[in-house]
Amino acid sequence: MRENALLVRDTEVEKTSVSESKAGTAPNYKGGFGFHRLFCFADATGGSLSEMGRVGNAAANDMVDLLTVVDDAITHSLPM
């Protein structure tokens, strides 16, 4: 393995609720409004490599969103 290889450990989603309908939010399955953010974390440090803000009714396992957030993490982690 390369010395500075990037290992993606995990992708996680987080539902963030807001008290009323705001720009960029959507109704979620629990009847509220909010955001459904998607994160990608590094293996070695556990630090967040990338994040994507999504509307509250976004699917948790949307393959396009998962690939986008992992691709973003890899792109921003490569040495210049």
Image (cartoon, rainbow, N blue to C red):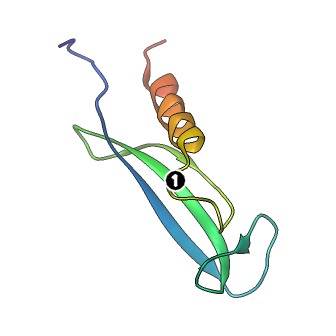
Q: Position of residue 52 (x, y in %)?
A: 59, 49
| View extreme (right): residue | 23
Image quadrant holding the N terminus, namely top left
- Residue type of the residue flagged with mark 1: Leu
Residue 78 lies, with reference to residue 15, above or below; the image says: above
**In the image: residue 10, left or right of residue 61:** left
Residue 57 lies, with reference to residue 17, above or below; the image says: above
Q: What secondary structure is marked by label 1?
A: strand
In front: 3, or 20? Answer: 20
Which residue is label 1 attached to? Answer: 38
Badge 1 local density, few (<14 within 10 Å), some, or many (20+)?
many
The quarter of the displayed image where residue 43 is located: top left
The quarter of the displayed image where residue 58 is located: bottom right
Residue 47 lies, with reference to residue 30, above or below; the image says: above
Q: Residue at x 57, y 35 (%)?
A: 68
Q: Position of residue 5 (x, y in %)?
A: 27, 19
Q: Residue at x 79, y 80 (%)?
A: 21
Q: Residue at x 51, y 42 (%)?
A: 66
**In the image: residue 51, left or right of residue 20:** left
Count all numbered tags in the image, as a single digit: 1
Q: Position of residue 49 (x, y in %)?
A: 43, 40
Residue 3 lies, with reference to residue 44, above or below; the image says: above
In front: 47, or 22? Answer: 22
Q: Position of residue 27 (x, y in %)?
A: 71, 77
Q: Residue at x 43, y 25 (%)?
A: 77
